[in-house]
Amino acid sequence: MPIKKVTRQSVSEQVFEQLKEQILSNEWKKGEKIPSENELAALLGVSRVTVRNALQKLISLGLIETRFGEGSFITDALPGISMNSLIPIAYLKENSLQEILEYRRVLEGNVAELATKKASAEDVAKLEEAYLAMEKVKDDLEQFSKADLNFHLLLANITKNSLIIQTFYIFSDVLNRAFSQIVTKRGNSAGIYYHKLLFEAVKGSNSLDAKRIMDEHMEDLYNTFQTNI
């Protein structure tokens, strides 16, 4: 797809979208050096400053990297990497936590099911370690909330799906701030109960049980959040 000169309003955004499309459509291949700022400015009919701003956005999304003295190159980005742009949205929206918990109610049961289907013996061992870590710090609710969240992040990793993994790590930054407050108000009993059942379901390769247990766990978490806001 040829690069076209920009003639409409919102020049900076158009430049960014065109360059991003070059990458996502594989016009520029992984590891390939892209044209210099001067070359891109000439091709697009815009200033170097506009091009530089667009390149900075691509760097922040993990789509390109700049090497000192060499130029900018296309990275080996995972499919979920561009979801990093969701981070500011998650922080800025007033009802972001409620929306994330609603989203988790829809998502996490399916994640648990997929993780159970894909879990290797090594994955099961890591999950057991994560659960035992929860038990070890159960009387320190701040540390317990972190261990709780780590268990969920590990399940996401076990799916080996980059979109799921990226989503969970984006949301964890937001959830981490609120988990300790929720755990402080409701204690550790629910977390210990559900995570033990989840571990046993994954260990036994019972994917449907894992989904059912996680769905119940997420419903309980959401209801607790609603009660305590």
Image: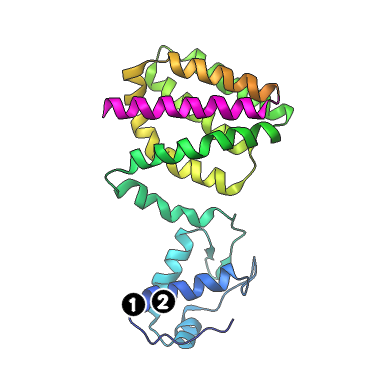
Q: Which of the pair 105/148 is nearer the observer?
A: 105
Q: Which residue is mark 1?
A: 10
Quadrant containing the N terminus is: bottom right
Mark 2 near mark 1, Cβ–Cβ under 8 Å? yes
- 42 in the magenta segment: no
- 225 in the magenta segment: yes
Q: Is residue 139 above or below residue 9?
A: above
Q: Mark 2 belongs to which amino acid?
A: Gln
Q: Which residue is mark 2?
A: 14
Distance between the Cα atoms at labels 2 and 1? 6 Å
Q: Is residue 12 above or below residue 108?
A: below
Give x and y (percent) for residue 156: 57, 37
Q: Main secondary structure of the magenta part?
A: helix
Q: Which residues are magenta?
A: 205-229
Total numbered circles: 2
Left or right of 186 on screen, residue 32: right
